[in-house]
Image (spheres, rainbow, N blue to C red):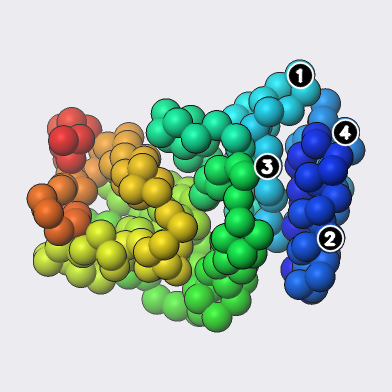
Amino acid sequence: MYKVLLVEDDADLARSVAELLRRYRYDCTVATDFDDVVGEVRAADPHLVLLDVNLPRYDGFYWCREIRAESRVPIVVISARDASSDQVRGIESGADDYLVKPFDPDVLLAKVAGVIRRSFGELAAPSGERPLEAAGLSLLFGQLLLRTNGREIALSLTEARLLKVLLESHPNAASRAELFVAAWDAEGFVEDNTLNVNIRRLREKLAGAGSDAQVQVVRGFGYKLTGGGTAGSAAADGGRS
């Protein structure tokens, strides 16, 4: 039974969501200490965190960054804030997905099932896999680890899934549809901003490592990896268009 930690200070909503998840055989724990959400994560040791934004004292964006500083547990932010800027902020804070309130229970269940399946189920990386290499990059998908330019970079699950598709497609482009399906197991229920922000984070990690591999836009289609080979120190400004 997969464990879900629900961090939601609206007691009625928390109760109804917890009951829904338990009905579908998830082991759902509801957080009670909103001053120490990281401690709640440590204690629950969940497979997934559902994290509200409007929390007492510190908001969900803060706690998302704090959780991500020490854990790669998948995080889905849930919030009544529906502005694109808030969704971008959630993804940039380390969330894997963003769900706007009020939400359809079926959409919530689909997102939870998708994250669990990608992380731990039939879509998770097989053990003992060989590195996937192209464009001067070496991806150890099962470890969520990228090697390039003599450095190792930790990736989120979503970043790793996106990079895997780009590497497999290289030197050709990967369509947006392919990337949506690979990273979120669906084209529905996912905002375009979610893909855009994760691509930007991937670009920043490549640039920060000094790799000359770039993720470039193919207008009207998707993205492709360019560059690569022997990484150089001047690559940091590539792929930001």
Earlier residue among tags 1 and 4:
4
Q: Residue at x 28, y 47 (%)?
A: 149
> Which image quadrant for residue 187?
bottom left
Q: Which residue is mark 1?
A: 57
| Measured Cα–Cα span from mark 4 to mark 2 | 20 Å
In the rendering, at what x and y percent does residue 71 appear?
A: 65, 46
- Near mark 3 (Cα within 10 A), the count class, few <14, some 14-19 or many ≥20, is many
The local secondary structure at tag 2 comes to: helix
- Near mark 4 (Cα within 10 A), the count class, few <14, some 14-19 or many ≥20, is few
- The residue type indicated by label 1 comes to Arg
> Which image quadrant for residue 55?
top right
Quarter placement of the N terminus: bottom right
Q: Residue at x 58, y 72 (%)?
A: 117
Q: Which residue is mark 2?
A: 19
- The residue type indicated by label 4 comes to Asp
Q: Is residue 165 left or right of residue 36?
A: left
Q: Residue at x 28, y 65 (%)?
A: 177
- The residue type indicated by label 3 comes to Leu
Q: Which residue is mark 3?
A: 51
Earlier residue among tags 1 and 2:
2
In the rendering, at what x and y percent does residue 228 appear?
A: 16, 53
Circles 3 and 2, Cβ within 8 Å, touching? The answer is no
Q: Which residue is mark 4?
A: 33
